[in-house]
Amino acid sequence: LTWDASLFGGPAWNPAWPETFRQSVAPVTALTADHARPNPATFVRHADPSRFAAERFAALLSTHGVGVTLRGAAATPAGSVELARVESPPVATVVEQLLLQSDNDAAEALARHVAVARGRAATPTDSAAVLADELRARGLWADSMAVRDGNGISADNRVTADALVRAVRSGIAERGRRAVVTGLPVAGVSGTLEDRFTVTDALAARGVVRAKTGTIRGVNSLAGYVVTADGQPLVFAFLVTGGAGQTAARAWLDQVTATLASCGC
């Protein structure tokens, strides 16, 4: 058994990523399985996701009585015969799931696929450049912004609150971008917001606010939309940077969005 993961170029680890994220995102390869986590109960990632996926496949073949010798990565031989295939869910479904769970692996892989679709190499540099081009084409760019990856974990990324608001508004207004809002977690109910909004001052947001989290060292954000107590729809984006610790920053974000939900605007 050999495997071909040549669709994506290198490096597999984006040089713009801090080492502290090695348990939050796996090296990016075109062949992977189970987020490259040998033990789903931990966040430890396999150093070679493509080999890990091939090992998993070989193990499954073995359980069905197919003897396999695992060789290594190799180009797909000319004239190979396709025995089976698995089709991806629609891109909108992938986007919804990665937003709900804040899936760094899926976000980065999706950025590489966009680069391929635009005729560029699926490298960290090319995929970041293509993402910036796509944002410009959709009116979601400001000169002060910078893109270094597809999942936002580089501290060198720069985004404005206004751009985040416009992205959410476009998801509401344009059917083709609807997954941007349908994938947003619900405060106190689902995804990355399931365990938040638990204190008294934040309860008004539960089940009402839908928003995407953003968390790296020294930065916490929340962007989404809410229908206020008097029926007014509001789109918002809050970013907290500097000295506030993660716990305090998240508490403030929860409380201020709950204030929006309960206000008569």
Image (tube, rainbow, N blue to C red):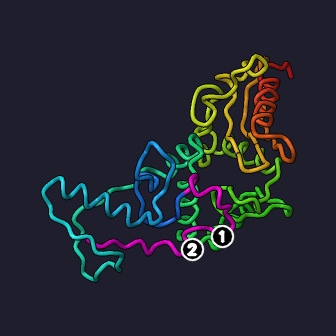
Dominant secondary structure of the magenta stretch? loop
Does residue 119 appear in this view? no
Residue 67, located in which quarter of the rendered image? bottom left
Amino acid bearing label 2: Pro
Residue at (80%, 37%) from the top-left corner?
Answer: 249
Amino acid bearing label 1: Pro
Does residue 253 appear in this view? yes
The crowding category of the residue bearing disc 2, from other C-alpha atoms within 10 Å (few below 14, some 14 to 19, many at least 20), is some
Left or right: 51 in relation to 262? left
Circle 1 sits on which residue?
15
Q: What secondary structure is marked by label 1?
A: loop
Residue at (76%, 47%) from the top-left corner?
Answer: 164
Residue at (42%, 60%) from the top-left corner?
Answer: 32
Farthest-out residue, left: 65
Mark 1 → mark 2, Cα distance in angstroms? 8 Å
49 and 187: which is toward the camera:
49
- 12 is within the stretch colored magenta: yes
Query: Quarter holding the N terminus?
Result: bottom left
Residue at (77%, 63%) from the top-left corner?
Answer: 156
The crowding category of the residue bearing disc 1, from other C-alpha atoms within 10 Å (few below 14, some 14 to 19, many at least 20), is few
Q: Are marks 1 and 2 in contact (CB under 8 Å)?
A: yes
Instruction: Please state the horizontal and vertical placement of residue 98, each as a whole percent of the image.
Output: 55, 47
- 236 is within the stretch colored magenta: no
103 and 141: which is toward the camera:
103
Farthest-out residue, bottom: 78
Mark number displayed over residue 130: none
Q: What secondary structure is marked by label 2?
A: loop
Circle 2 sits on which residue?
11
Left or right: 76 in relation to 220? left
What is the span of residues highlighted in magenta in the rendered image?
Answer: 1-25
Instruction: Please state the horizontal and vertical placement of residue 207, each as a whole percent of the image.
Output: 64, 23
Residue 121, located in which quarter of the rendered image? bottom right
